[in-house]
Amino acid sequence: MTLRTSPEVGGMGHSIKRKEDPRFIRGKGTYVDDVVLPGMLYLDIVRSPHAHAKIVKIDPSKAMAVPGVLAVITGQDLAKYNLHWMPTLMSDTQMVLPVEKVMYQAQEVAAVLATSRYAAADGAAVVEVEYDPLPAVVDPHKALEPGAPVLRTDKKDKKDNHIWHWEWGDRAATDRAFAEADVTVKEKIYIPRIHVASIETCGCIAHFDKVDGKLTVWMTTQAPHAIRTVFALVAGHVGLAEHKIRIISPDIGGGFGGKVPVYPGYVIAVAASVLTGKPVKWIEDRMENLQADSFARDYHITAELAAKKDGTLTALRIKTLADHGYTDAAANPSKFPAGLFHVCTGSYDLKAAHVEVDGAYTNKPPGGIAYRCSFRVTEAVHTIERMVDIMAHQLGQDPAEFRMKNFIRPEQFPYKSALGWEYDSGNYGGALQKAMDGVGYAELRREQAEKRNRGELMGIGISSFTEIVGAGPSKHFDILGIKMFDSCEIRIHPTGKAIARFGTKSQGQGHETTYAQILAEELGIPAADIQVEEGDTDTAPYGLGTYASRSTPVAGAAAAVASRKILDKARKIAAHLLEVAAEDLVYEPGKFSVKGSPNRSKTIQDVAFAAYTNHPQGMEAGLEAVSYYDPPNLTYPFGSYICVVDIDKGTGEVKIRRFLAIDDCGNIINPMIVQGQVHGGLTMGLAPALFEEISYDEFGNVQGGSFIDYLVPTAVETPKWETGHTVTPSPHHPLGAKGVGESATVGAPAAIANAVVDALWHLGVRHVDIPITPPKVWKLLREKGVTE
Ligand code: MCN
Ligand code: CUM
């Protein structure tokens, strides 16, 4: 991409340093727990030791005797205001505090309000709760068996634990393709429960000002406006109207999807503040965060792939059981209970596909949020990339050649997938070829063959993923009815500096920098002169927030469109200043000049000043614009990753020797930030591939509830990532950009899993579920008789 602006202006393509970093690296960020208000009270939560139990009695007397404890809040208290249940984003219902029974271990049971955090915790430790344990339903398959205990007894007509059935695609055509196929492969793939484990846990400070009746909530949320509307809808009956609610999302220490939902702690804090008229702070600790916040994945998949003898793929069939815990609290666009899972045909030109998903209730925390995955895209990519690899190996074909043969070709874009998506642009062969050249693929295959002769286990894994990000066109995408547009409002000040506000909310992605670069690109105002603000619902224009890598595709587009509206007016002002017709001006970023006499020109700063001091008669003063952008389509970033592993026959350890990621997110705003996103994303893809899993024992006890058991990779476990990119612009995005924030997390696990299976295929191993831990591999090696 040729750069249109100088490094000083810092438009698109410049790796300018992040504007937010000076405050972060000096420890001067303002995270929610940094906010301290006079007279603030603290909340701590009593949690259930049982996965499923009736609550017989809650005795607050000992807690009330702790100095500083002011109140013990129970479900009965909230029930008086009908606030003991709340709706989830998927229109299910979730307990704020229970009245009858608890549904998972670590569920909120009661809350203690005190004058200090320590008093609240001391009080919570001595609230006496009497439980009557009930049988726990842990396995979602068993949950759907006849005779399984019905969990949601609160739902009058509910006679089983089945939440919903969803299917997509042409079943008959798919069945026909399978009947006619020369070769088919079938595999069961489990994608386990994992947790985002962001550095900052969740929390809020609710402050209800009794004098003006206004509620202000500082809150770790990725979607402040949506939260405000949901609060108004849920608490309207207790007098909270939307103009009297202000949500402020301060600096956030990682969101990754886990900060989209509303958690009970938020609602309890708000209720406590409304009742006391004092600010109330609630901050989760690490174990609460891991054990009780929304989880991701937990998909039990059965996938089948069909091909002709020559290796041409024809059809895909998938059946999935989704474990949602005790309530469906997925953060999906409302019309898609399984998210965008139906992008599962991936990068391949399949003629037919059919996918079915069933949701089940179990005695686990509410599940189904996205974890750096744009709504189930990781599950989709893992499935298709594993299946394609299995098919290639089954046919005895090289997995790279096999992919090249089956890719959607560049000239087929825009491409309509068998499951109905319209892929905007792509060059999958280009990305894979670049990755193969970068790692020296042919040489690696030779090395692998030699090593295999010597009995050494080396594997090469490929993942050529296609993502779908930027939800989304409002025709299909809404959350609880609110359409998924996003917004940008720009004001140019008289001296040529600017402020731009957005409906999104950065959690570490660097929006203060990259949005300023978009404005710099369009307007020619230096990025350093542009203040970017997000996250305060009293000042920012309405938007749906940051997740699903939608900020660049949607709000980034809004920034370009709003800038262009400003330029329309700026051109008229410049024409007035230069005393020519607007059509006689040529524009380059930051400068209007007269056609044919380039010396006669006005800068954007001249124009800004004139907009307030010397604007044409009949024109309104000022230089401002706003755009609410409704994208015509999603964007489809893609990439090809190649992973090389060596497997230790003594320990079963998988060692990643090399990992090369070639990404394509269309035109790039800031290459350094994109590379940072890819690095972080790769580590978050490595995590579930080799380390992370939250499992439960038969009683529903959580087995990954602290960092002792939940293995988050550190720098020590993380290999040196090699990165690169190709550029295939999005044809419908005003800047040709696609999202990138989740790509690496979506694409990486399959490359790692494919490398492991590639190392073991000759021993008869067809599939290994992630996380691929040393004990799992060692057990396989032992079965095959090759341990050392
Ligand atoms: N970018 C760019 N050029 C492009 C595309 C993106 O320069 N063609 C830049 C953007 O301007 C932005 C960053 O890359 O600064 C990510 O942009 P985008 O892909 O639009 O994604 P979002 O900003 O919407 O971020 C959401 C995405 C998601 S959904 C998860 S989950 C995730 C991720 O971002 N959570 C993160 N990356 C994260 N990074 C950090 N540090 N913290 C999180 O919580
Ligand atoms: Cu897919 S997790 Mo992100 O959408 O915040």
Image (cartoon, grey):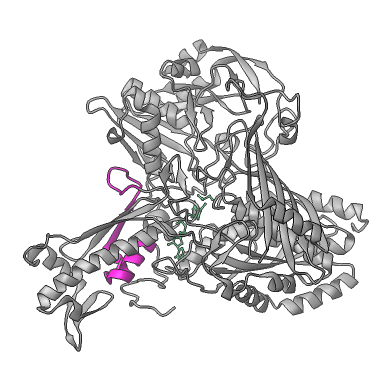
Number of marks in picture: 0
Which one is nearer the viewer's eye here, 197 or 340?
340
Residue appearing at x 51%, y 57% in the figure: 469
| Left or right: residue 749 compared with residue 668 | right
Which one is nearer the viewer's eye here, 30 or 472?
472
Q: Is residue 45 above or below residue 337?
A: above
Residue 165, given in percent of the width and then of the height, sits at 64, 39
- Residue reaching furthest to the bottom: 596
Q: Quadrant of residue 508?
A: bottom left
Residue 647, given in percent of the width and then of the height, sits at 80, 61
Which one is nearer the viewer's eye here, 122 or 412?
412
Q: Is residue 482 above or below residue 105?
A: below
Q: Is residue 778 above or below residue 391?
A: above
| Left or right: residue 642 compared with residue 514 | right
The answer to whether residue 714 is visible is no
- Residue reaching furthest to the right: 785
Residue 522 forms part of the magenta stretch = yes
Q: Quadrant of residue 572?
A: bottom left
Residue 723, given in percent of the width and then of the height, sits at 58, 70
Quarter of the rendering occupied by the C terminus: bottom right
Q: Quadrant of residue 392?
A: bottom right
| Left or right: residue 757 compared with residue 43 | right
Residue appearing at x 63%, y 59% in the figure: 418
Quarter of the rendering occupied by the N terminus: bottom left
The answer to whether residue 235 is visible is yes
Magenta residues, as a range?
513-542
Residue 138, given in percent of the width and then of the height, sits at 71, 31
Residue 633 forms part of the magenta stretch = no
Residue appearing at x 87%, y 70% in the figure: 452
